[in-house]
Image (cartoon, rainbow, N blue to C red):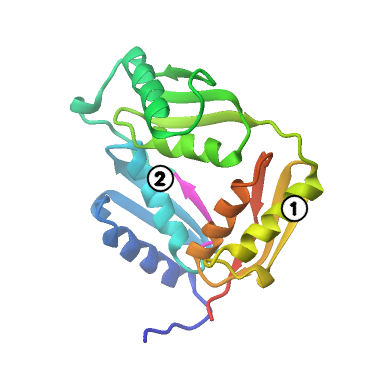
Amino acid sequence: MVSKMATQTDSDIQLDVMDEIRWDARLMATDIGVGVKNGVVSLSGWVDSYHKKIAAEEAAFRVRGTLAVANEIDVRLPSSAERTDAELAQTVLNALKWDTTIPTGTLEVTVSKGWVTIKGTVEYGYLKVDADRVVQRIAGVRGVTNQITIRSTLKPIDIKERIEKALVRNAQTDAQSITVETKEHHVILRGTVRSYAEKIAAEQTAWSAPGVRSIENNLIIQPF
């Protein structure tokens, strides 16, 4: 069994992030720079797709000790991925239609110099997250601004209760270590989890409740 000291220095975090980036088959570690100060990871360099930029950020967050990530990686598209804004907008609309359960015609998509902005209204927060995931993977996208809003008829107390019950059902989360707060339709998660994967699982569970408009994930990773 591999074990580590509980406290990670900035140097430890930097080395672990670099190793995590090397481990990710989507990324070329030689193209990405990593700096760490007070637990905040700074990523620099370049990649050839927006999806890889997000992949590098996710790799940094997977490392124990990472408190925040400043993602300053440039996206340099290869000539084969270059598209006009009109072509990219149509591709985004098609992808959202095929790869999500968002009703057709619900969303409005605009593209400017490869940067995609999505607007519209949906009932579930996970649909907003899902739209992000789909657009990030499209060749030619340089960035995404997700302005989708969430509508709801549920009261905040009902949202809180539904999330708490879902966390208990979820085998990936320890519900006893997680507290849920709701302010209007904003959800705050507090407590401790054993891994980054559990932290994300708890957030995804919260997004699945109808009416959740935003989530503040303050869960602290404390490996046992």
Q: Which mark is residue 26?
A: none
Q: Residue 171: in sight, yes or no?
A: yes
Task: State yes or no: discs 2 and 1 in contact (Cβ < 8 Å).
Answer: no
Answer with left or right where residue 97 lies relative to residue 129.
left
Is residue 27 placed above or below 83 in the rendered structure? below
Task: For mark 1, give the secondary structure.
Answer: helix
Is residue 188 placed above or below 13 in the rendered structure? above
Please state, as top left, top right, bottom left or bottom right, where the N terminus lies in the image.
bottom left
Q: Nearer the viewer, residue 173 or 135?
A: 173
Is residue 157 placed above or below 178 in the rendered structure? above
Identify which residue is drawn at 49% across, 24% down.
Answer: 117
> Residue 100 appears at what percent x and percent y?
44, 34
Task: Specify few, some or many for label 2: CA neighbours under 10 Å numbering under 14, 14-19, or 20 or more.
Answer: some
Task: Specify few, some or many for label 1: CA neighbours under 10 Å numbering under 14, 14-19, or 20 or more.
Answer: many
In the orientation shown, which residue stands out farthest toward the bottom? Answer: 1
Q: Which residue is under mark 2?
A: 54
In the rendered structure, which segment of residues is drawn in magenta?
66-71
Residue type, mark 1 in image: Lys
> Residue 110 appears at what percent x and percent y?
47, 17
